[in-house]
């Protein structure tokens, strides 16, 4: 029997994004007129207690009230949301019946706003919609305003929560915002450590989107630009949070990173999820895992690794050596982690080596990644986690 060959060109790709992305320094001061187009009189603002007390948030609320809107505020807890937290947000939005839902905050706040706006027009609870494409109807008008430059939640169809068994995801085009509003001014007060963690999260979205088997030319385009912007601007934003140009470029990079999620994340995010057991936030876990997963996948995607390396500053004239290019790319990410005092190994975090088997089993069974470019067995994951434990990033 002849083997049938399927060309990558025969694969059908979809690139999903918000209806509108509007961005610029100080744009929040002029957004009232844009919101009038929704023909609603009430704003349902989802934020957290810390963001609500910042000067940009106070000015934004003042802008909304002076534009004639009634503003109702839901304050979320300042931590990764559980499904019960999401359902509390859903109940708040449903109780108001109508209005424009605005999520202003980091990824956790925006993810809650996405699901709450959708479930205002869909029955049930958040846990009823875990999985892919389970939300049948669009919800209330939704506007997302990121206050960190990292998660890309403002441009992705995904919302991530802590469920009964760990990370849980709602994925549907019906939770995408109508408008994503990107104003770097709201990120200036973000301290250096979360600036670094969220920025490395954005870098992981871009690099993993390229590594993914579901990468396509549109994902490649936005992801390469995101990588270049992050490599140049994240150190500047980390070292001087008031650098508005660096903050602007990081906001754009994070939004592009969110669009890179059209390719899907790969093994790096699965590894990052398992590191949550040791107190690693999502962004920190992604940063720790990223260079190790790049090393792991490099032999399967030499051409892609060259393009990633070039976006990170590799001399294009030397890019004919795949090992050299992959080594360069991995070392740049390692150097960024070192600059931000992010651990390179689990050993340095105080994780016992005996935990590797437990982590491997969780990664393999709970967070499979069929779109990872290198197919892997349990033994492969053991080797990956052993390198992660020791900090070995040498590409041989």
Image (cartoon, rainbow, N blue to C red):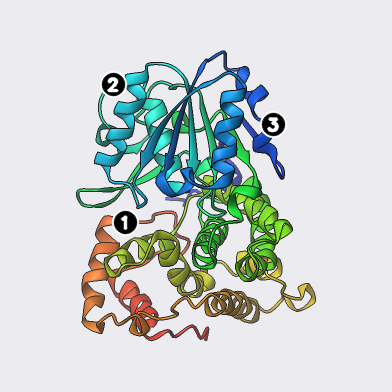
Determine the secondary structure under disc 2. loop
Separation of disc 1 and disc 3 at Cα? 42 Å
For the point 61% across and 76% down, the residue is 332
Foreground disc of the pair 3, 2: 3
Distance (Cα) linking label 3 and label 2: 35 Å
State which mark lies toward you, 1 or 3.
3
Q: Is residue 83 left or right of residue 229?
A: left
Residue at the disc numbered 2 = 123
Query: Where residue 191 appears, x then y in whole percent?
Result: 53, 63
Q: Is residue 259 above or below residue 382?
A: above
| Most distant residue in the top direction | 39
Disc 1, SS:
loop
- Crowding at dot 3, Cα within 10 Å, few <14 / some 14-19 / many 20+, comes out as few
Q: Is residue 39 left or right of residue 105?
A: right
Whether 394 is drawn above or below 33: the answer is below
Across and down, in percent, residue 4 comes to 49, 48
Residue on which the image places disc 3? 30
Label 3 sits on a secondary structure element that is helix
Q: Residue at x 72, y 42 (%)?
A: 24
Q: Nearer the viewer, residue 382 or 376?
A: 382
- How packed mark 2 is, by other alpha carbons closer than 10 Å (few <14, some 14-19, many 20 or more), is few
- Judge whether 167 appears above or below 338 on screen: above
Instruction: Say which mark, if any, is on residue 367.
Output: 1
Question: Are circles 2 and 1 on residues that touch, CB within 8 Å?
Answer: no
Query: Residue 284 got which mark?
Result: none
Of residues 124 and 302, the one drawn nearer to the viewer in this rendering: 124
CA gap between label 2 and label 1 equals 28 Å
């Amino acid at each position: 029997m002849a083997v049938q060959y399927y060309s990558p060109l025969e694969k059908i790709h979809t690139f999903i994004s918000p209806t509108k992305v509007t961005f610029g320094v100080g744009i929040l001061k002029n957004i009232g007129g844009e919101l009038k187009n929704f023909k609603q009189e009430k704003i349902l603002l989802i934020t957290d207690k810390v963001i609500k007390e910042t000067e940009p948030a106070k000015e934004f609320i003042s802008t909304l009230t002076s534009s004639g809107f009634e503003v109702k505020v839901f304050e979320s807890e300042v931590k990764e949301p559980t499904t019960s937290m999401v359902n509390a947000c859903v109940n708040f939005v449903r109780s108001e019946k109508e209005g424009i839902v605005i999520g202003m905050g980091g990824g956790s706040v925006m993810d809650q706003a996405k699901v709450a706006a959708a479930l205002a027009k869909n029955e049930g609870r958040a846990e009823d919609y875990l999985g892919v494409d389970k939300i049948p109807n669009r919800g209330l008008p939704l506007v997302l305003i990121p206050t960190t430059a990292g998660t890309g939640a403002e441009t992705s169809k995904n919302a991530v929560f802590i469920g009964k068994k760990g990370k849980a995801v709602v994925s549907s085009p019906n939770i995408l915002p109508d408008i994503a509003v990107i104003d770097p001014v709201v990120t200036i007060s973000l301290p250096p450590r979360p600036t670094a963690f969220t920025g490395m999260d954005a870098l992981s979205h871009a690099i993993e989107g390229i590594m993914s088997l579901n990468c396509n030319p549109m994902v490649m385009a936005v992801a390469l630009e995101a990588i270049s912007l992050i490599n140049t601007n994240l150190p500047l934003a980390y070292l001087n949070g008031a650098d508005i140009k660096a903050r602007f470029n990081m906001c754009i990079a994070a939004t592009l990173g969110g669009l890179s999620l059209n390719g899907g994340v790969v093994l790096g995010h699965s590894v990052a999820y398992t590191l949550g057991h040791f107190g690693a936030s999502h962004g920190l876990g992604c940063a720790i895992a990223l260079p190790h997963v790049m090393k792991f996948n490099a032999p399967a995607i030499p051409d892609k690794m060259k393009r990633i390396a070039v976006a990170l500053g590799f001399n294009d004239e030397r890019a004919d050596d795949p090992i050299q290019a992959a080594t360069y790319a991995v070392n740049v990410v390692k150097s960024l982690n070192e600059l931000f005092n992010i651990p390179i190994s689990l050993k340095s975090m105080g994780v016992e080596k005996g935990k590797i088997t437990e982590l491997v089993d969780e990664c393999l069974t709970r967070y499979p990644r069929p779109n990872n470019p290198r197919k892997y067995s349990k033994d492969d994951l053991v080797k990956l986690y052993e390198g992660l434990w020791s900090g070995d990033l040498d590409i041989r």
